[in-house]
Image (tube, rainbow, N blue to C red):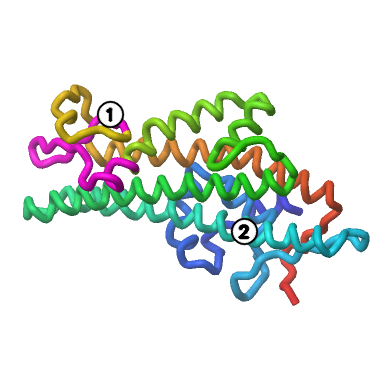
Amino acid sequence: MIGIWLNVLSLKNSKDSVEQLYGDDVLKHFPNYEKFWVEFIGNPKADQVEPYKYRYPDNMTTEERNRIEKSYLKIRMSHYTLFCHLAGAHFQEKELKNARSVKDPNEKYFRCCEHFEAAYMHIGSAFYVLATLWNTVLKLIEHREGGRGFDKLERFLNAKGKSELVKGLKEIDEDIMNRRHLPVHYGRVIAMWYQGEMYVPLKVREEMLWSQGNETTEWRRSDSQLHSDLVQTEKLINELHEILIEEYRGFITSKNIVIDHGEKMK
């Protein structure tokens, strides 16, 4: 039945306005957002936004039920927040493109910088929320190795033989996240203006000084860089979600939990 729902549902049918507006943009490279939502969270027959009802076996302790319910709430919150940050990045990407046609040079400068930086703040926040989502699930399945942030996930992925995904996470941390850190820590990004267009360095270090921008030899137009980084971000998260879906499904099955798909909560 889950497979049938995945074929007929769309976020356009969601009762949530953000999912309606940016579902197509986010799902283009992150379709597993919808898969996770349909299988574990969403209620396609509800008249309002409601989660599924989880039903637990009679022999499960109250303490264990409460632990799972609390984690389930956190999973719903972080999963949706992840989508909202990606939607925000797509919004800022569109606004950055619109800003390129602004005539007043001062307003154009401000808007281009503002939308570029705001987009990376959303992307950075998406990864922080992704870490919360993963750590919540890993704690549920009692995978205790690792520390904060992505440490636990990286240990888990290495144990699963998914070293390429660990490499992808590290590349994100060393490259895309630095585009988030620099404006947050120091104000305007290092940028070069050429013939009325904003260009940014291909490589940005976290503690990069403005003066070091003069030493940069490789530049890319800001809207092209943002688009590339946003696609890379969503593709990596989508790959990680394949494993997340499998692990969370396995946990639900192992605990003999029944999910009332499509039934309203009483």
Residue 215 lies, in percent from the top left, at 16, 24
Q: Which residues are magenta?
A: 181-205
Which residue occupies 38% across, 38% down?
177
Q: Is residue 102 left or right of residue 166?
A: left
Q: Nearer the viewer, residue 196 or 217?
A: 217
Q: Do residues under tags 2 and 1 come within 8 Å of each other at their CB atoms? A: no
- Above or below residue 202? Residue 223 is below
Kind of residue sitting beneath label 1: Leu
Residue occupied by mark 1: 202
Q: Nearer the viewer, residue 45 or 218?
A: 218
Residue occupied by mark 2: 74
Mark 2 and mark 1: Cα distance apart in space: 36 Å
Which residue occupies 41% across, 45% down?
124
Which residue occupies 36% across, 36% down?
228
Q: Is residue 12 left or right of residue 40?
A: left
Residue 262 lies, in percent from the top left, at 72, 65
Residue 182 lies, in percent from the top left, at 29, 41
Specify whether residue 216 is painted magenta: no
Name the mark on residue 78: none
Which residue occupies 44% across, 29% down?
171
Rendering quarter of residue 15:
bottom right
